[in-house]
Image: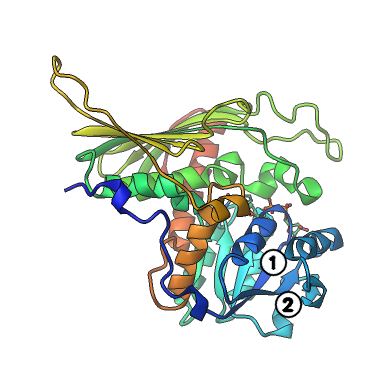
Amino acid sequence: MHRPSDARPVLHVQQSGDDIDMRFGIVGTGLMAQEHIRTLALVPGLQVAALADPVPDSIAWARHTLGAGSEDVPAFDSVEAMLGAGGLDAVIVCSPNHTHHDVLDSLLATDLHILCEKPLCTTVADARAVAERAEARARGVFWVAMEYRFMPPVRSFIDDLHDGRVGTLRRVALHEHRFPFLRKVGDWNRFNRNTGGTMVEKCCHFFDLMRHMVRAEPVRVFCSGAADVNHRDELYGGEVPDIIDNSYTIVEFDNGARAMLDLCMFADGAEEQERITAIGDAAMLEVGIPSGAKIFSPRVPLDAPKRIEREHVPVDARALAAGNHHGASYGQLLAFLDAANGRGPVQVTARDGLSAVAIGVAAERSAAEHRAVAIEEVL
Ligand SMILES: NC(=O)c1ccc[n+]([C@@H]2O[C@H](COP(=O)([O-])OP(=O)(O)OC[C@H]3O[C@@H](n4cnc5c(N)ncnc54)[C@H](O)[C@@H]3O)[C@@H](O)[C@H]2O)c1
């Protein structure tokens, strides 16, 4: 039976935050690292104890975000140098996508708890290698930062689905209508070879959400997409960016559910950045970000009045202010801490990260070759 969603916690509230004393290293101190640093500051007992980045300006950026006392935090130009100094409990990897494999190669040899930004890697081979090593470790949590799962309205929406609120889930449609990719340090995100392609880089979030919502594995992917509007007038060493800026992707799952992703990265003016619709045999459920509006529409007989229920899922104001992902980094961090301290499961495993990369790689191949791609072709 469906529990009223207002009875659920706004966030996965940590029961004993002030008894946690953990020292974090940050690998890659660019844009996303700033969000993690601000989020770590929300939890008593957590400390940023080391920074690793080869670019001094990025280290300075992190020190600025850390504020008073940041000059005492040691900085290194590589993850290896940071590990050599020791003294850490956990590491957050926020270096560019194409560096994850090598950075993780060093980190996976340790017992440190690892929160690795998405996508896990840029290729299926690299992601599989990392997943196998992560699973073979005797100690240390490994968690892939698929933080869209932790946006409170999305989390509430998924809880409803898993509670059976729409009946048997048959269809999921995700829409992301947003601004173009931001500039990154060294412009690494302008080329597929560094990102894995937009369907891996950006859309791994949505492919992960699809799997998580339908609780099934992908079978086939069809993607129509191209680089049509954004970055067409940019040149890097004589090269024009090659990243997809809009696409439609259909994913079929092995339980018969189907899912669709509608991505447009030249829709800066859209009211909702993300809209998700899930339809089962009993009802339809929608959610929007940033509005936090959740709309439940059960099926009704043709001549009966509609019974639409609307609610607003709130987000903790401090979590919202810490980042650009609707409070998700905070909820993700709390769940990561629970796992690291033996109080909860790893909710996004390396295997989940591998699956999201595989769907993204299949989508990139589908778009390039104008055909449906069976997941077994890439996985
Ligand atoms: N979860 C999300 O929603 C989300 C959002 C944005 C970015 N990300 C991910 O976070 C990661 C970083 O993205 P960003 O936006 O911060 O990029 P960025 O370019 O702003 O920062 C990356 C930093 O990593 C540094 N770096 C490069 N190679 C390194 C290495 N080998 N070791 C350590 N540092 C290195 C760069 O100098 C730079 O300072 C990417 O994997 C990206 O996909 C995730």
Rendered view: 287 above or below 100: above
Kindly tell me whether mark 2's CB lies below 8 Å from ligand 1.
no
Residue plotted at (67% across, 85% down) = 87
Rendered view: 363 above or below 271: below
Q: Nearer the viewer, residue 211 or 22?
A: 22
Q: Quadrant of ligand 1?
A: bottom right
In terms of sequence position, does the residue under pointer 1 or pointer 2 come before the other?
1
Rendered view: 348 above or below 292: below
The image position of residue 289, as x and y in percent, is 49, 38
Q: Is residue 119 visible?
A: no
Q: Nearer the viewer, residue 300 or 10?
A: 10
Residue plotted at (55% across, 40% down) = 199
- Element marked by disc 1: strand
Q: Is residue 297 visible?
A: yes
Q: Which mark is residue 82?
A: 2
Side of 49 where 185 appears, left or right: right
Side of 341 where 29 appears, left or right: right
Q: Which mark is residue 27?
A: 1
Side of 190 where 270 appears, left or right: left
Which three-letter amino acid code belongs to the residue tagged 1? Val
Kindly tell me whether mark 1's CB lies below 8 Å from ligand 1.
yes
- Neighbours of disc 1 within 10 Å: few (<14), some (14-19), many (20+): many
Q: Which mark is residue 373?
A: none
Q: Are marks 1 and 2 in contact (CB under 8 Å)?
A: yes
The image position of residue 141, as x and y in percent, is 48, 73
- Element marked by disc 2: helix
Which three-letter amino acid code belongs to the residue tagged 2? Met
